[in-house]
Image: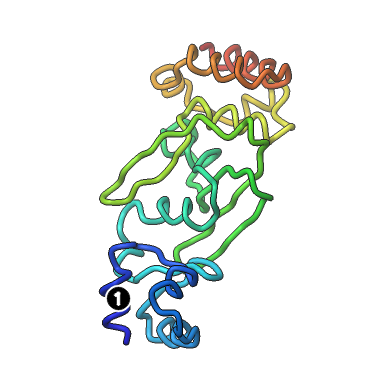
Amino acid sequence: MYIDFKKIFFEQICFSHHQIELVFPKFDKKNLSRWQKKEYIVKLRNGLYTFPEYVNQNGFNLYAANRIYQPSYISLHYVLNFYGIIPEVINSVTSISTLKSKQFNNSIGKFSFQTVQPKMFFGYEIKRTNSFDFQMACPEKALIDIFYLYPMYNTAKEIEQLRFDDSVLKEIVNLKKMNNFLKRIKNETLNYKVELMKKVYEL
């Protein structure tokens, strides 16, 4: 049974209960528990699984983040570290979603999702690592998401304590692109915070 199952679902990378039942209408869900114990499959969240061959491949955790909670894109501290804007190692993949805020822990790692209004759900790109495609915020939008979701960053002192690498900011952040995002959002508080950031880091 498992050999046939794997032949069908392996190329999908991740698979759900619903997908299994479409192919095997009489599938016994107890198989999933047995296969987990034998380490034939890996549980990502309730109802979503993958195969162990994928788990340690570079980029899979980012692909999985998009699949665990949909719709979502990777942003916030993870992206700032990804681009070298902040030096701290981030212990979880941080994402944005229009669904309610949620966290998931599994054998791959920690995944956190913070909710935003639908009008804020933009500014991400499709990236690829190995054979894994995933949605990730561009650095400009990751910065905006930080200021949008964390109200404490509203003074020059607080923004300075974020310890952004000013040389990286100057190299990779497109201020025109960022301003266009702000015009689209139309939020005076965000505008103020971004202007503070520009002054603090001399952008």
**Is residue 132 depicted above or below 38 in this figure?**
above
User: The residue under label 1 is which amino acid type?
Assistant: Lys
**Is residue 94 depicted above or below 116 in this figure?**
below
Q: In which quarter of the image is residue 194?
A: top right
The secondary element bearing badge 1 is classed as: helix
Q: In this view, does 119 lie to the left or right of 14?
A: right
What's the coloring here? Answer: rainbow
Q: In which quarter of the image is residue 126?
A: top left
From the top left corner, tell me how far across and down residue 199 is, in percent.
60, 12
**Is residue 68 depicted above or below 84 in this figure?**
below
**Is residue 85 depicted above or below 109 in this figure?**
above
How packed mark 1 is, by other alpha carbons closer than 10 Å (few <14, some 14-19, many 20 or more), is some
Question: Residue at point 52% right, 70% down?
Answer: 47
Question: Residue at point 53% right, 31% down?
Answer: 122
From the top left corner, tell me how far across and down residue 42 is, in percent.
42, 73
In the picture, the quarter occupied by the N terminus is bottom left
Question: Residue at point 47% right, 38% down?
Answer: 79
From the top left corner, tell me how far across and down residue 60 is, in percent.
36, 56
State the residue in front, 185 or 16: 16
Q: Is residue 8 left or right of residue 154?
A: left
- Provide the residue designation for mark 1: 6
Q: Is residue 6 left or right of residue 189?
A: left
Question: Residue at point 49% right, 69% down?
Answer: 18
From the top left corner, tell me how far across and down residue 146 is, in percent.
61, 33
State the residue in front, 188 or 89: 188
